[in-house]
Amino acid sequence: MNSFVLRMVSREVRASWRRLLLFFLCVALGVSAIVGVRSIIQSTHETLLSEARTLLAADMIIRSRSPWTDDVSVTISKRLEEAKVLARTESIETATMVRPADATKAIAKMIEARGVQPGFPFYGVIQIAGGQLYSHELLAGQGALVRPELLTQLDVKVGGKILIGNSTFTIRGVMLTEPGNSMGAFSLGSRVLVDHDDLQEAGLLSFGSRANYETLIKISEEGIEPLVNQLKEDLSETFIRVRSYHNSENRVSRNLLRAENYLSLIGFIIVILGGIGVWSVTRVFVRQKIKSIAILKCIGATSKDLLTIYLLQVILLAVSGSLLGVAIAAVAIEAIPSDMVTGYAPIDYQLTMSATLQGFGIGVLVSLLFSVVPLLDVRHVRPLLLLRYEMSNERQLVDWLRVTAVIVVMVALIGVASWQAGSLTIGFYVSGGFALLAICLHLASGVLIKAVAPLSRLSWFPLRHAVMSLASPGNQTRTIILAVGLGSFFLIGIRSLQTNLLEEFALEIRDDAPDMYLIDIQYDQANGVRDFLSDHGDNDSVELVPVLRARVTGVAGKQVNLEGLEDVRGMGSLAREYVVTYRAIFEKNEALVAGRVWSDAVIPEVSIEESIRDRFQIDVGDLMEFAVLGRTVRATVASVRSVEWSDTRRGGFMFVFRPDTFNAAPHSYIATMRGPVSTEQRARMQRNLVE
């Protein structure tokens, strides 16, 4: 590289920096988005992975939705003894109601109660308000730790008494964090921590009650995987789950990586929009420099020298813009409070090296890709142009170098998009979508110019001049329409996605929409609840819906044949536990798709939701086997139903059985209803119903 090139780069940058400021800012904004998003997620990732054991509160956990049988208990104890585990402890979780022991306070609330033994948790800390240290002695003798919101909801204080089931508990502290909270993302109520034995004595764990039974294990790192694999093999014919904190690591990693790739892809799209600005600025810049280029060629500069000069300018601006983007991201990250994510250790948000290198590299690469094609026009500028300016518009019919450059740019953008999305398929879709949209906008701009051309003959000068400017040589009409169109498409697309997701999860408020939900109504409580509701307001029409929990254990069908639990597990979500019901007719939100409602056959019958048929090839006439309350139920598929999932007050079930299937089986009920308008009346009704 000769000194002439370097001197020209320095001179051009000093002379043209104002015109190239937009170039600089476009790169900076895109890079800041990528670096900021990736750094935040990667910082969160590192913190959560370091707390993977805290997410489980143990090295391993064995979980069942039903009480441990003698055979299972013996098997687990034998394997734990052989593996020389360091410690084990038991835990039970269940959803129930709580109310103040003070009878003058007519309040009842749903809670998630967890009973733990001494030794819990193995990892993590139960933080208690006021700096009080946790010990199991706080739970001994029917003590309880509650969440702060429950004190307000029940109008009680630390030291007050609450009723859970048949037992009275004393509130001994306010729990701020709880390791190993495993009830799921959807919470039925505030968390309450009590002693394991006290929860069992509260009368909440009768036959048919819904509860999670857990054995938490502490073991050396090298012993985790062998023990997990051995227990999975021993318990393969049961519905017991065995997992280690490695599962939490993998799940957290997958979810955060998916979020990182998605948000980084948005940042990449911002860079692409900035790249369009880079292309436009470079194109205009080259056209403004035509005479200067012609003069330089007159004094001996070659096209190669000139391309090098302007490419170095692009690189210099891209590097500067990328550095500014990194700086903007650093400032933004510093402003994020470390305790933004509650329930875990404070997260030290900071720039990560991988995010910085990715953002910086993408900023420079996209700048080069979008500027190289307009810079190739430098080759067509001839010294004679100083005398004949019209030659500046001359160009050979097919510029193969330009065509090659365009192809290289497209392939490179597909590669970068795939890299950011973590998927070649998604990269193709995103790049193809942008290319298709760009073509449509380019054609639309041509149509617009032709459509307004007749207006150039009007007598009003401002309008005539504006229309003529749209079609004048060297104008930015197509570029502006492309940039504005792509930007609008991006913003509207993201906004529409947000709106659709919110609408998908939003509850439709109808005049008759229920505002009270009754769950876990036991079989022997059903008549009493019906009588209570009929005596309190306009609740004669409240229907108690019977529910049971069932698992598919086999299928004998025309298209699929599953022999045993292992085959069912191979079908993915078909092996999960389902809430099922029985009834004689379909509800208003259900429609018959295939088959008939019920027949008089001796063998039990079941109606399946259409997604079961579509995903697992199970159809009318197939024989299904279910595990329900410890016994096997075989039922023929009598029909396929569609379900309107936006209204599932009575009909939101994947499997509906014929009414006579569970005549003698114990089960619980759920119900929805309209409660009293007055807050005081609602609270009194809840309390009276619980009592």
Image (tube, rainbow, N blue to C red):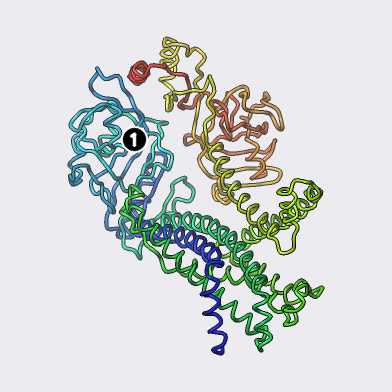
Q: As rendered, which of 659 and 368 lies closer to the eye?
A: 368
Tell me where residue 293 appears, x and y as whole percent. 66, 79
Q: Residue at x 78, y 52 (%)?
A: 447
Q: As rendered, which of 156 and 690 lies closer to the eye?
A: 156
Q: Residue at x 58, y 39 (%)?
A: 625
Vertical relation: 318 (above or below) 636: below
Tell me where residue 586 appears, x and y as whole percent. 63, 24
Which element carries disc 1, helix, strand or loop? strand
Q: Residue at x 54, y 32 (%)?
A: 580
Q: Is residue 8 visible?
A: yes
Q: Quadrant of the N terminus?
A: bottom right
Q: As rendered, which of 142 and 88 lies closer to the eye?
A: 142
Q: Amino acid at mark 1?
A: Ser
**Which corner quadrant of the image does residue 397 belong to?**
bottom right
The number of callouts visible is: 1
Q: Residue furthest top?
A: 535
**Which corner quadrant of the image does residue 433 belong to?**
bottom right
Tell me where residue 89 appears, x and y as whole percent. 28, 48
**Residue corresponding to mark 1:** 190
Q: Is residue 58 visible?
A: no
Mark 1, residues whose alpha carbon is within 10 Å: few (<14), some, or many (≥20)?
some
Tell me where residue 577 appears, x and y as whole percent. 50, 40
Q: As rendered, which of 121 and 424 lies closer to the eye?
A: 424
Q: Is residue 530 left or right of residue 125?
A: right
Q: Quadrant of the C terminus?
A: top left
Q: Is residue 543 left or right of residue 133?
A: right
